Amino acid sequence: MRGSGSRGAPALAALVWLAAAGPGAAAGLGAAAVLGADGADVDGADAGGVAVNGVAVDSAAVDREAVAAGPGRPGLLSTLGGDAQAAGRTFSLFVRREVWPRSAGQLVYLGSLAGVSAILEHDKEALRRDVLRSSFYRHSHWTQIGGTLGLTRVGYGAAGALYLGGLAIGEPEVRRTGMLMAESLLVAQGVAGAVNFAVSEQRPQAGGAIRFFHSGGSGVSIHMTNTTALARVLDHRFARFAPDDSRGRRLAKILGKVLIYSIPTITGWQRLRADQHYLWNVVLGAGLSAYVTDALLRSYDQVAAPPAR
């Protein structure tokens, strides 16, 4: 049989190199394998070489390329394209299945959030006075940190750092966390923006008047939207309890949750102390962001789940 014996090793090396080279080279992998089996287009080149579809390939160079690429490690463009597809599928599933509440629990959650927000809005000036008179962390580094962490550029900066860091060190879970964080921020901000347009409230210092369907409102705190989305993603990715968690691992996750949720807590207090929002704006921002982010994360879990056998 042609292509066997001494020619088998260089041909196999060529196929390994093609597979490691990425989707473009992989497109010709099947044809090369079929042709090689018949010996029609795979022939011995010069010493130590092999010809694939008429192109001479140095088998020693092929071996070096295969070792350098690593077994099964995708190329950069393949990784970026795969992540973009995963993000698109996640958003598509979110739109189709999660935009409108489908379960009784979701309806109860949203109804309760609307009811609590309405009660707090009714008493917003009295609550505002209580907060401003409080001496609890009136001026401190904590409140300054909370205001900084809620900035949109900080949220996307953290997402970008996780994604690029995971890409650089070859950690897909870290990379996917950055991708999910950016997508969650984008979707949660979109929902918050729509509500801010529908219920457009002036800031407390400007009088707090509410206008419906008007731009420039602050009925939903974007700072709270950002930090709550960030906290929900970090909790989902790193601090979720698993049935097989040991006692020590479970304790570590509890401490992690405390640290994670201290971020939106500090941010919420800062927005109140800085007189940038009423309490109902903070509660509505956190509640809506948690609801939307959890829905997006459920969609991602469905997309990422292995196919049923």
Image (tube, grey):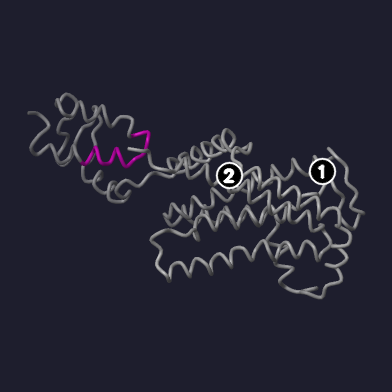
Task: Answer left or right for 215 relative to 290.
Answer: right
Q: Which residue is mark 2?
A: 295
Task: Answer left or right for 39 relative to 282.
Answer: left
Spatial CA span between label 1 and label 2? 23 Å
Q: Are marks 1 and 2 in contact (CB under 8 Å)?
A: no
Which residue lies at the image location 70% right of the left edge and 66% below the top edge?
266
The quarter holding residue 19 reads top left
Percent of width and height locating residue 270: 76, 65
Is residue 23 part of the magenta span, yes or no?
A: yes
Q: Nearest the camera: 51 or 18? A: 18
Q: Nearest the camera: 133 or 71? A: 133
Q: Residues within 10 Å of mark 2 (few under 14, many from 20)?
A: some
Provide the residue span drawn in magenta: 13-25
* Position above or below: 46 against 248: above
**Where does the N terminus fall, quadrant-wise?**
top left
Q: Which residue is mark 1?
A: 199
Which residue lies at the image location 57% right of the left edge and 44% below the top edge?
296
Q: Residues within 10 Å of mark 1 (few under 14, many from 20)?
A: some
Q: Report the disc number at residue 234.
A: none
> Mark 1 falls on what kind of element?
strand
What kind of secondary structure does the magenta stretch mostly adopt? helix
Type of amino acid under label 2? Ala
Task: Answer left or right for 30 relative to 117.
Answer: left
Percent of width and height locating residue 280: 78, 55
Which callout, 1 or 2, points at the residue further toward the start of the chain? 1
